[in-house]
Image (cartoon, grey):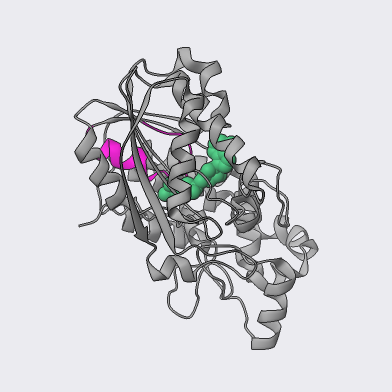
Amino acid sequence: MRNRFHSICPYFAMFPEAFAETWLDRLTRRNDVVLDPFSGRGTTAFQSLLMGRRAVACDVNDVAYCLTKAKTDAPRLSSLKRRINQLEEGFDGRRWHHAAEKATEFFQYAFHTTTLQQLLYLRETLRWRDNRVDTMLAALILGSLHGEMDTSDSYLSNQMPRTISTKPAYSVRFWKKQRLKAPERNTFQLLRSRASFRYESEPPEGEAIVLHRDMRDLPRIRETLPQRISCVITSPPYFDVTDFEEDQWLRLWFLGGPARPTSGRLSRDDRHSFEAEYWRFIADMWRSLGAVVSRTAHIVIRIGSRKVSPDRLAKTLNASSVFSNRRVELIGQEISEIQKRQTGAFRPGTVGVSMEVDCHFRFRS
Ligand SMILES: C[S@@+](CC[C@H](N)C(=O)[O-])C[C@H]1O[C@@H](n2cnc3c(N)ncnc32)[C@H](O)[C@@H]1O
């Protein structure tokens, strides 16, 4: 059975676990340290632990941090259940009545009043940044916060895609036009059932360092990182494809962010529209990697773009590796087509990609 923690929550432009698994199998051994500086939903780190490797993961986005941390430091199911009971006992709908009423039209349509009261309470109560039980509960809610209500009862919201949070005005227009009403869900019950479902799989043992920061900071905190990072498996934001912060605004709201889509608050690099700026950012990535990984590390990078051909992407990625200040060899490159489902999931206004390129580099000094 596929480990159920992998799919706690989808993440835009995520790679499948088979991608991480294949490269880990090819390039690493037990106890090797593997880094993903753009960890997203945490697949590289989680798969590394499953395969007995050690992991370092880094991302600026709160959703990415919460998901990666939850998966790689899962508490016991019994602790989760205890905490859910405690949270449910502490919930008093009357206290949240006013806050729910004051919420914008989007929230009134997106969630049933009772569900919204519970979400507001949990949003304020969960200490997801520093308590591993609460991190897992927040991650489980993120995975259920929105989705298709006609195909499953595991989502809390009115009809929405599960990959991205649609914009407020667009969503309200859609719900009104379709006369759609948010389902009444009990968030505590949903948490119990989601937790039991995920824990059908064993969480892995082992060690992961999960960093909630810009990957450019890695050289500054080098002393706190393991000495021999021998492999990097990652995918930076693609060129001019999507804005992770804007596309996940509702999940970010649940983690304490603003009640509307924002951009550029968490990262300036989610979506570069000018090629020169994009490649400056990729040069920064190489600088960071060059400063923190071992002398002979393997680096596997998946990138994509609709505007730039895969061939040119690979060439420019290779050329920019000079900024690592290392001798770098391009061992191989492979162009692949994105699965239909993911390409189709790109929201209106987001440029889809249909091709991706995987490059395997090796540092030689
Ligand atoms: C293509 S996604 C990674 C997806 C991931 N491979 C997965 O399977 O879920 C790129 C990630 O880079 C993060 N990011 C953007 N700018 C960053 C920066 N300067 N430092 C670290 N992470 C950053 C985004 O938040 C996003 O999660």
Q: For this view, does 321 lie left or right of residue 329?
A: right
In percent of width and height, residue 202 lies at 24, 45
Q: What stretch is highlighted in magenta?
A: 35-52
Up/down of 202 relative to 95, above or below: above
Please say whether residue 274 is one of the residues in the magenta stretch. Answer: no
In percent of width and height, residue 214 lies at 58, 32
Q: At x 62% / y 47%, what residue is drawn? A: 275
Q: In which quarter of the image is residue 348?
A: bottom right
Up/down of 347 relative to 315, above or below: below
Q: At x 61% / y 35%, what residue is drawn? A: 280
Q: In which quarter of the image is residue 249?
A: bottom right
- Nearest the viewer among 113 and 50 is 50
- Nearest the viewer among 298 and 133 is 298
Q: For this view, does 177 lie left or right of residue 69?
A: right
- Nearest the viewer among 139 and 174 is 174
Total marks placed: 0
Location of the N terminus (image quadrant): bottom left
Extreme-right residue of the structure: 102
Task: Confirm whether residue 338 shows in the render.
Answer: yes
In percent of width and height, residue 216 lies at 57, 27
Q: In which quarter of the image is residue 282?
A: top right
Q: For this view, does 221 lie left or right of residue 193?
A: right
In percent of width and height, residue 73 lies at 38, 35
